Every structure is written in C-alpha cells, then in structure tokens.
Amino acid sequence: MKVIAFGVREDEECFMDPVAKKLNIDVEIHTEHLNMETVHWAKGFDAVSIVGVCQADRNILKILSGYGIKALSTRTIGYDQIDLKAASEYGIKVANVSYSPDCVADFTILLMLALTRRFAHMLERSRCMDYSLHGIQGKEMHNLTVGIIGLGRIGSCVARDLKGFGCKIQAYTDYPREDQKDLVKFVDFDTLIKTSDIITLHMPLTDQNRYMINADVIKKMKPGVLIINTSRGEIIDTNALIEGIENGIIGGAGIDSFENEQEVIHIDHNYNVIKNRDLLILKAYPNVIVTPHAAFYTDQVSYDMVHCSLESLKHLVNNQECRYQLN
C-alpha cells in the first residue's frame, strides 16, 4: 500500500517513517500542500494524507478519483476543507483524526488567564521598560461565569480544568450527557450568551453553526465579555466581532482560529504582505490575542496525528472498520 502525504511539517516528518514501517505501508512525504498544482503527484498511490490548509474540493477529489485514490485522511480533527459529498460521489473514503483533547483545553485556559490578567499587555509594556500598574488590573477566575458552547471531548476537558478555579461553569450543547452534570450547569443558548463573563467555543464548523456568534448575538452579551475561539474561525462573524470590540460590548478576545486563515497560518510573513485585513485589525487591539491556529500543537499531538492518519488510511483501503471514517 502506497500513501502520499502533503503538507508534512518537520515535527511530523520524524514520525512518518517509523509509523509507516510499523503499519507495513510505504509513504512519500511532501512539505507542499495538496492543490491544483501538486495534485498530479498523487498518481500511482492508493491513499492521500493531508492537513487542514490543503485543498480537497470537488475538482481535486475528481482528479484523485481518476488516479485511483481510494482513501483520504486529514491529519486534523476539523474537516471542513474536504467536500465530503463529492468524495462519496467519487468513491473516496475520508477520515479525520483524533488526538489528546488536553492540548486544546490547556491552550483555552491559557487564553482565558492571559485575558483576565491582561498578561499580553504586561509583556508588551515590559519590553519598553514600563512596569507601572495603570491599566493592567485583572479579574479573578472564581468570580466569573464561564460559558462553554460545545461539550465534546475538548469542551469537557475545559470544564474539568475550570473546576479547579472555582468559577461558575455553564454549557450549551446539542448532546448533553448525564455524567456531565457534575461538571457544568446546562443552559439554553440565550441564557449562556446573556450571563457569561467568558464564552469559549468548542465545536466543528457546520452549515448550521456558521456565524453562530453574529451581531445580533453579540448585542445580547454582558458588557465586557471575553470570547475564546480555539475551534473554527467561521463560527464567529469577524466584522461583528470587530464592531463588538469597538463599541465596548466585547472586553477582549482570544482567537486561535480566524476567518480566511488558510493563506496566513503556519507561514512566516516577515517579508510578506498579509492580505487579511480583518486579522490585521484584530491584532491592532490591545485586548485581543491572536495565535496561529496552534492550540493543538504539542509533541504528543504530532505523533497522534501521523499515526491516526496512516492507520485510518490502511483500514479504509483494505475495507476494514475505521472509527474515524466520515463518509
């Protein structure tokens, strides 16, 4: 079985060959992303492994199908970059991966603490030798109400971690579980939006939740609310977020995933012009922290993503059960 892997980072490369040997498959590694210019490299392979910024739309999938590609796996939890309907039509089985939810949960707590204690602002001022206290007074977590939207593996870990801070934790989810009632108080969406001091998002992007956080929703929020997004950028209407920050409803935001991030994240732009104006506006605010979609990025996750992706491809090509199959 032959696999071609696109968008392989240095931290993944060291795991590719050992995992491939363990699974008894051949893998060819490319740092370039899958797109219309590189798709022809997949000719002669059985399966394709990609990352989130790779292109896997209908046109790409049609070409892959013509090359006899039987399976495609993304080395990410999110899979909104893949046209699942087209993949099914062209007979390509698709899978995502699973990895330790603690990585994103840890990062979410990090953003909460950095915003509530104005930590990024302190660091910026210290570079200019400004060690005054004016403007950096923070808040204590035990005095705050945190609203979690989405209570899957990551959202549940966030709730578990928040428990130790003594804050009030409430959650809105389409799939409440009985065993989570000791962690959170389940509320409806409007209640969470109106009563939370911090709102954190933990869900995959779907047509149903695109722009879930929009201008009408933001108007209902508590003045000074903090918003954390370590899920998908398109869950928030960025223009509405900017307006909410400027009119003072939103007191701060921790953004690890933002709209139209594909040409920005995981790229060194020191000598480039970034063509994402909304991102540049957000970065200009002192109460906003923007990170490069890196909440997942730990040593454990790098291994998990490679192993899960290659193992899933082997199962899919051999018509075996694959727990991460999406179509």
Image: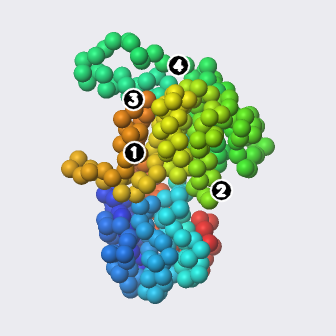
Please, what is the three-letter code of the amino acid marked with disc 1? Leu
Q: Nearer the viewer, residue 252 or 53?
A: 252
- Is residue 108 among what the camera can see? no
Residue identifier under label 3: 286
Q: Earlier in the sequence, mark 4 or mark 1?
A: 4
Q: Residues within 10 Å of mark 4 (few under 14, many from 20)?
A: few
Label 4 – label 1 distance at C-alpha: 27 Å
Vertically, is 40 above or below 264?
below
Vertically, is 70 above or below 142?
below
Where on the picture, by quarter, is residue 148?
top right
Q: Residues within 10 Å of mark 3 (few under 14, many from 20)?
A: few
Residue identifier under label 1: 279
Observer-side mark, 4 or 1, equals 1
Q: Earlier in the sequence, mark 1 or mark 2?
A: 2
Q: Secondary structure at mark 2?
A: loop
Residue identifier under label 4: 139
Where on the picture, by quarter, is residue 223?
top right
Q: Secondary structure at mark 1?
A: helix
Please, what is the three-letter code of the amino acid marked with disc 2? Gln
Residue identifier under label 2: 208
Q: Nearer the viewer, residue 272 or 140?
A: 272
- Image location (x, y in percent) of residue 197: 60, 28
At a point 51% along the width and 81% down the height, the residue shown is: 70
At a point 20% along the width and 50% down the height, the residue shown is: 271
Q: Secondary structure at mark 4?
A: loop
Disc 2 vs disc 4: Cβ atoms closer than 8 Å? no
Q: Earlier in the sequence, mark 3 or mark 2?
A: 2
Which of the image's four quarters has the C terminus? bottom right
Observer-side mark, 2 or 4, equals 2
Label 3 – label 1 distance at C-alpha: 13 Å
